[in-house]
Amino acid sequence: MLAQTKRSLIEVLSRNKVIPVVENRTQFLTALTMLTPYVLFLRNCDLFDLKALCQQAAQQGYLLYVNADRMNGIHPDAAGLHYLAEQLHVAGVASTNLKTLTLASTLGLSTMLHIFAADSTGLESAIEMGNVTAVDLFNVSPALVVPFIAETLTTLLTRPFIASGLISTRRQIQAVVQTGALGVVVPQPELW
């Protein structure tokens, strides 16, 4: 099932490069009514409050990804990650913590390492901080820097990547995607 989830994410991103990120019930409902089966990122959410919506989204074919570092109500330990997979039907988790991603991977969840590209040293140290074999995809932030560091990214990253942060226009999305990002995470419904 994990291989199917990974293929599905890459397949979805090959058709639509925009990845909506939702932070509350209103945004979640908007995404469910606006989009065809798709991928959604949940960030800063009270997941117990959103349980029914997560189940509905999974039944409709959405791939749900949760930011494990910013979940309200669930700790990113074995029990919490198991709950995400079995009860909320998430496809994967994003985190800056390789231990969390390694554990998530053993539970069959797809994993995404969030990297903050504040400078070249920070980017290199994020990649070199440990064994990234449990990482399926990288998420580089802020997305606006991706066109300027594309060559460095293709040299350093051993997996495909998406980008997130500071995007506010379709032109910016296109510029990031043209540099090799599989997709761009955006919170504004008008850009979905």
Image (tube, rainbow, N blue to C red):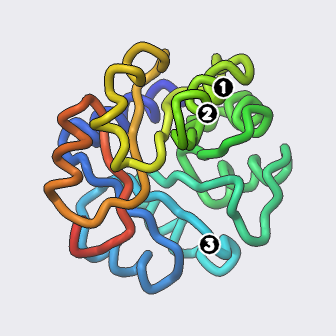
At mark 2, the secondary structure is helix
Nearest to viewer (mark 3 / mark 2): 2
Residue 131 is left or right of residue 123, and the answer is: right
Which amino acid lies under the numbered mark 3 shown in the image of this protein?
Cys
Q: Position of residue 100 (x, y in %)?
A: 76, 39
Residue 125 is marked as 1
Q: Which residue is mark 3?
A: 45
Residue 183: quadrant of the picture = top left
Instruction: Estimate how packed mark 3 is, as few (under 14), some (14 to 19) or many (20 or more) residues with alpha carbons within 10 Å.
Output: some
Separation of marks 1 and 3 at Cα, in angstroms: 29 Å
**Residue 60 visible in image:** no
Instruction: Give the amino acid type for the residue marked by disc 1 in the picture.
Output: Ser
**Residue beneath label 2, please?**
122
Where is residue 166? Give x, y as percent.
38, 60
Find residue 188 and name its label.
none
Residue at 46% x, 21% y: name it: 159
Residue at x 56%, y 30% (from the top left corner)? 123
Q: Quadrant of residue 171?
A: bottom left
| Residue beneath the point at 78% across and 63% down | 74
